[in-house]
Amino acid sequence: MAPRFAARMGEIAPFHVMELLRRASELERSGCDVIHMEVGEPDFPTPEPVLEAAQRFLAAGRVAYTPALGLPALREAISAFYAERLGADVAPERIVITAGASGALVLALGITTDPGDEWLLPDPSYPCNRHLVRTFEGRVRLLPVGPETAFQPTAAMIAAACGPRTRGVMLASPANPTGTLLSLDEIDAIAEAAAERGAITLVDEIYQGLTYGVPMRTILSRRRDVLVVNSFSKYFGMTGWRLGWLVLPDADWVREAEKLAQHLFISPSTVAQHAALAAFLPQTQDELERRRAEFARRRAVLLRGLDTLGLTVPAEPTGAFYAYADVSALGETAERLAQRFIEEAYVAVTPGRDFGEHRADQFLRFAYTTTQARIAAAIERLAKVLRR
């Protein structure tokens, strides 16, 4: 019997970068040396204090469920981090610990989105967001953005795009795939424009802390009426631990998220939560700042290298660990170039089609999540391919 799938699955596209990663793995198994610049995963190991905390917890032998909202001690630690590092008053009771940032997005959309509700997202943006909206039977309206606004929406765009079914606006600062930031003033203006039209604002801050020449910041220092998603994956270097958090405006919002979390997840990973308590220790924070400084050096190597290849990065990437490069001058589509780069140079990068539709064939995303030496080697390999 032919399987019958939900109609929504016809609109859920694959995450193309994962297909590219599969091809890279095939090449590696055949003996090829692949330089990975396609996946947004830091190459640094989990910080040692975090590992030690997990080991101590496991040695005690009692790995039970936690409350659905997460360990109270971890919620308090995150609250203290907001106060001490970001100047934001965020009570622990407003913080929900989740199974990664993806879990936070699932809860945020689950408690807000009815069938047919519309969310406004920039194009390009992180692809999973639009598919999560569709999973909850919502609709996405993509707003084309370009270098002239640092690939970010403006308050005027949001005001013009809001309609009777607009439920919310999703922003990301720093953003994937572009690495660009919105200022707090810009986020504030967008949130105000949305609120005036009955829409909520959800801000993805999962790359918070990974900024270069710009201080770490949060919209929570300005506004309480926004939803904020964050993660232990990027700045804290804990990708595989699958742990994040969601900040909500007040107790009513938290109660709704708690009910949904109880059914969807029971609770976040207990081991990961106990490990994450050590992420806020002074020695861990010192190590994370050293890593941020190394990312800044890698960024400089990559941007210089892309310039020598004739690839333009039209909006300065001041955050995350990506550069979104315009390849239109090379006379080939980004998709074709990505294929050539992996097959001929064994360098894996991500074509723009993963992130939306607007000028997607013109852009490649380069992740500087590998060493400076490997980035330099990748540039040399690509130069040889482009000279052919």
Image (cartoon, grey):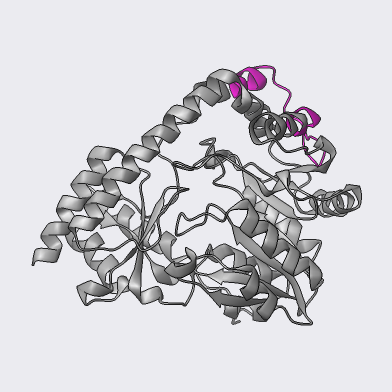
Query: What percent of the width, then of the height, locates residue 99?
Result: 67, 46
Query: What percent of the width, then of the height, locates residue 201?
Result: 72, 62
Q: Nearer the viewer, residue 104 or 302?
A: 302
Q: Residue at x 57, y 40 (%)?
A: 216
Q: Residue at x 71, y 41 (%)?
A: 268
> Magenta segment: does it hold 65?
yes
Query: What percent of the width, then of the height, locates residue 205?
Result: 61, 49
State whether residue 367 is above or below residue 385. Answer: above
Count of numbered marks:
0
State whether residue 151 is above or below residue 164. Answer: above
Q: Which residues are magenta?
A: 51-75
179 relative position to 75: left or right: left
For the N terminus, the image quarter is bottom right
156 relative position to 117: left or right: left
Query: What percent of the width, then of the height, locates residue 204?
Result: 62, 54
Identity of the residue furthest to the right in this view: 252
The quarter holding residue 116 reads bottom right
State whether residue 58 is above or below residue 22. Answer: above
> Magenta segment: does it hold 13?
no
46 relative position to 313: left or right: right
